[in-house]
């Protein structure tokens, strides 16, 4: 069964799905959502460190230099744990991806340095966000979810994209009947939106 409020995966996924029903728009988001998260972590690398891993002696010096406990690591850990709470199996995979993104982004940021890294991030973010807005405007013909709920759209998008892939490729469901109930809610939400849109036109 779905959980209440913030942990209600069923309602969260239905909200997201109502804005992503067109197959091409779904594909665009599948390609671009995780790169947005990844490149954001590259910039987060340059935020102040909470703890210097070079003092721990756990890792070789080169790794110590790259892996800094700062806002980037904190954000990755928070998202990973949140996804696990939403769904243990898919959430655990999402948490591993968050960790992998943090590690990869940290090494890239350390290698590039801030003066080059922010330019790479800027180009990547512009490309990915432009692609998504075009996907909504041309194919979905509906404004992005972030215009209605910014926090939910940004925080949940990586997990929803992963969940969509797992469902499409492997028929995965967090629990029995999940997809059927979500699809019903998506259809109802889309119909409500279309009815409101029609009233405005008439």
Image (cartoon, rainbow, N blue to C red):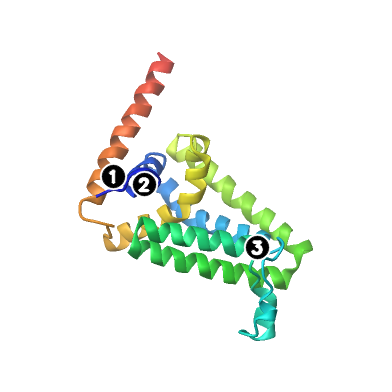
Circle 2 SS class:
helix
For residue 148, side relative to residue 2 (left or right): right
Residue sitting at x 62%, y 57%: 40
Badge number at residue 147: none
Residue sitting at x 65%, y 64%: 70
For residue 188, side relative to residue 20 (left or right): left
Question: Circle 1: is it few (<14), some (14-19), or many (20+) Cα within 10 Å?
Answer: many
> Considering depth in this image, is 83 or 93 the residue closer to the camera?
83
In the image, residue 60 lies at what x, y percent? 65, 86
Circle 3 SS class:
helix
Circle 1 SS class:
helix
Gap between marks 3 and 1 measured at Cα: 34 Å
Residue sitting at x 55%, y 66%: 101
Question: Circle 2: is it few (<14), some (14-19), or many (20+) Cα within 10 Å?
Answer: many
Question: Circle 3: is it few (<14), some (14-19), or many (20+) Cα within 10 Å?
Answer: many
Instruction: Give the residue pinned by disc 3.
Output: 42
Gap between marks 1 and 2 measured at Cα: 7 Å
In the image, residue 85 lies at what x, y percent? 38, 58
For residue 156, side relative to residue 90 (left or right): right
* Quadrant assignment for the C terminus: top left
Q: Earlier in the sequence, mark 2 or mark 3?
A: 2
Q: Are marks 1 and 2 in contact (CB under 8 Å)?
A: yes
Residue lying furthest top in this view? 202
Residue 107 sits above or below residue 127 on the image: below
Q: Earlier in the sequence, mark 1 or mark 2?
A: 2
Residue sitting at x 45%, y 55%: 30
Instruction: Give the residue pinned by disc 1.
Output: 182
Instruction: Give the residue pinned by disc 2.
Output: 13
């Amino acid at each position: 069964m779905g959980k209440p409020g913030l942990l209600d995966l069923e309602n969260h996924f239905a909200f997201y799905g109502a804005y992503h029903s067109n197959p091409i728009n779904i594909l665009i988001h599948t390609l671009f959502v995780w790169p947005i998260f990844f490149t954001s972590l590259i910039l987060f690398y340059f935020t102040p460190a909470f703890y210097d891993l070079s003092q721990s002696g756990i890792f070789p010096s080169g790794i110590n230099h790259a892996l800094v406990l700062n806002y980037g690591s904190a954000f990755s850990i928070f998202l990973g744990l949140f996804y696990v709470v939403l769904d243990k199996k898919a959430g655990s995979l999402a948490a591993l991806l968050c960790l992998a993104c943090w590690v990869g982004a940290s090494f890239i940021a350390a290698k590039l340095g801030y003066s080059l890294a922010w330019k790479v991030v800027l180009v990547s973010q512009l490309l990915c966000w432009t692609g998504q807005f075009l996907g909504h405007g041309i194919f979905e013909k509906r404004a992005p979810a972030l215009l209605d709920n910014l926090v939910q759209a940004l925080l949940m998008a990586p997990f929803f994209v992963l969940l969509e892939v797992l469902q499409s490729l492997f028929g995965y469901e967090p629990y029995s009947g999940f997809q059927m109930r979500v699809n019903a809610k998506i259809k109802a939400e889309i119909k409500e939106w279309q009815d409101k849109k029609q009233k405005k036109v008439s």
